Image: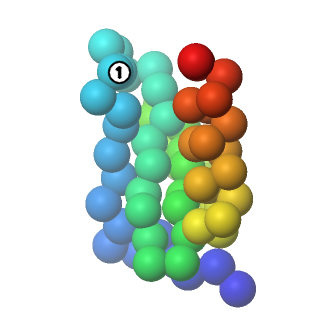
Amino acid sequence: MYPTTDGARWRTSSYTQQQNCVEVADLPQASAVRDSKHRERGHLMFTVAEWRAFLLGIKQDRL
């Protein structure tokens, strides 16, 4: 079961130049992702392992 996002601190990337982006909340056992323009539509949850794999894939693709 995933934790709730109640009281979560949402953040955007430091690379964001405008409001059209995603926001991420780092939770103890998961990460949540949502669209900054449509917060009311909810969020996606990823386990710590899933989120790490995603970030690793992004970093490897940039090199």
Give the colour scheme of this rendering.
rainbow
Q: Is residue 54 visible?
A: yes
Disc count in the image? 1
Q: Looking at the picture, how far across and down is residue 27, in whole percent?
A: 44, 71
In front of the other: 5 or 49: 49
Residue 20 found in image quarter: top left
Q: Is residue 63 left or right of residue 50?
A: left
Q: Looking at the picture, how far across and down is residue 43, in whole percent?
A: 60, 54
User: Relative to residue 41, is residue 15 depicted above or below?
Assistant: above
Residue 17 found in image quarter: top left
User: Relative to residue 56, is residue 32 depicted above or below?
Assistant: below
Image point 32% across, 72% down: which residue? 7
Q: Looking at the picture, how far across and down is residue 30, in whole percent?
A: 56, 70
Residue furthest out toward the bottom? 1
Q: Looking at the picture, how far across and down is residue 21, in whole percent?
A: 47, 26
Q: Is residue 44 visible?
A: no
Q: Amino acid at mark 1?
A: Thr
Image point 58% across, 18% down: which residue? 63
User: Relative to residue 27, is residue 33 depicted above or below?
Assistant: above
Image point 45% across, 49% down: which residue? 24
Q: Quadrant of the N terminus?
A: bottom right
Q: Is residue 28 left or right of residue 16?
A: right
> In what element is the residue under mark 1?
loop
Residue where numbered disc 1 is placed: 16
Residue furthest out toward the top? 17
Few, some or many residues within 10 Å of mark 1 (<14, 14–19, 20+)? few
Image point 56% across, 31% down: which residue? 59
User: Relative to residue 48, is residue 37 depicted above or below?
Assistant: above
